[in-house]
Amino acid sequence: MSFITQSQDVVWRNGRIATMNTDLTTAYGLVEGHDLIVRDNKIMAILPSDTVDTNGCQVIDIEGRLVTPGLIDCHTHLVFGGDRAAEWEQRMNGVSYETISAQGGGINSTVRSTRQLDEDALFRASQPRLEALIREGVTTIEMKSGYGLDFDSEEKQLLVAKRLSAVYPITVSSTLLSAHTVPPEYKGKPDEYIDFICHTIMPQLWEKRLFESVDVFCESVGFSLDQSKKLFLAAQKLGIPVKGHMEQLSNLGGSELVASFKGLSVDHIEYLDLDGIKALKESGTVAVLLPGAFYFLRETKLPPIELLREHQIPMAVSTDFNPGTSPFASLRMIMNMAAVLFRLTPEEIWSGVTCHAAKALGREHSHGQLKAGFQADFVVWNAHEPVEMIYEQGSNPLYMRVHQGTITHHNK
Ligand code: DI6
Ligand code: FE
């Protein structure tokens, strides 16, 4: 016996633990015959069971079930008002995107609905979406603003995200995406709007600590490379990490821009090229893949997965949950899409929703792996192999969900 527990510890015994620990050489960092020892909200140690003296503390026998880190959804637009179902029905009936836009559809229709709701109503609208993700094992989630686009509405979205994190057993990382699109009041004046973000929205909401990073939609239908750079320079002055919706519909060189700011992640990246990939390698930026939007928009240009692999760029996988291009409140379904549509391997996908997703949020030293000193965020599954959670859809194999050491769900 080399490890003697304390009375407040909880020992999780007889699990197959897919640690996703990048120091281990087994697939998924899997260990068997080990105890997962939790003290307060942290993992104390993972040790061979025959070396642990449980010393009378609580022991939970998980009877050979699989344990993984809690899932991390590192890119969502979860807080918004209304929906775009009617618009989508029109699209499915053959109405063109231009016509729908001209009728006031698209991002700005969600902006109108979001502005209309007060904070309580926006909170209630967000609850079922978050609950769905929690139920399937998500323990950390990123949430963006970007459907308010004026000071009060951006603040309202971020306040709702903060309230969700206080009410639900989940860790929330908020992102300022005021540079999502040009709001109607600034129509034709994108530079003035960027100035308003740089001088007013960003510094004031940063002062209130309502977000952790700054994002931009860098695209011909969004903001230019120069406008994105201006935003990032202002963020850098305040010490705010940056990331971007980059290379989704065309290549503007956005990924190189993010890399030059040592940004956290570049997201979408269907049109990313080799120069961009080399820049990401230099800066240690994560490539976030969003197969839900690819699927829903019936895109055909695949992200350069093979090159990302070759250059060992960490790849994350996320829902991009939003009402326009990825209305999917299921990270597990997105994991399936990452396999079928993007041809990621099951192990790459698991890394994509755990350790690499944590890195995309700047939390790679505390989240996304099961190892000593990390947050005790994990899921016990009614399953034997990690691939099962990617393979079968519609059922919920979650047996127990643990957030910061506390059991939040216990299913049969
Ligand atoms: N890229 C997208 O695909 C979504 N936002 C973004 O930056 C579109 C969001 C929407 O249509 O509401
Ligand atoms: Fe997005």
Image (cartoon, rainbow, N blue to C red):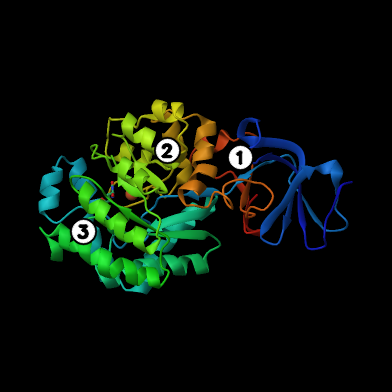
Mark 2 C-beta closer than 8 Å to ligand 2: no
Mark 1 residue element: loop
Q: Is residue 102 left or right of residue 130?
A: left
Q: Nearer the viewer, residue 199 or 78?
A: 199
In the rendered structure, which disc, 2 or 3, sits on the residue that comes first in sequence? 3
Q: Is residue 307 left or right of residue 172?
A: left
In the rendered structure, which disc, 1 or 3, sits on the residue that comes first in sequence? 1
Residue for point 15% across, 39% down: 94
Residue 9's spot in the image, x, y percent? 77, 59
Residue for point 13% across, 43% down: 95
Q: Is residue 59 left or right of residue 141?
A: right
Residue 63's spot in the image, x, y percent? 75, 42
Looking at the picture, does residue 264 appear above or below residue 156?
above
Q: Nearer the viewer, residue 95 or 43?
A: 43
Q: Please give the residue where the numbered disc 3 appears in the rendered image.
A: 109
Amino acid residing under circle 2: Glu
What's the CA distance linking mark 2 and mark 3? Answer: 39 Å
Numbered label attached to residue 369: none
Q: Are there few (<14), some (14-19), or many (20+) residues within 10 Å of tag 3?
A: many
Q: Please give the residue where the numbered disc 1 appears in the rendered image.
A: 20
Looking at the picture, does residue 166 appear above or below residue 370?
below
Q: Please give the residue where the numbered disc 2 appears in the rendered image.
A: 282
Q: Do we see residue 149 in this rendering?
A: no
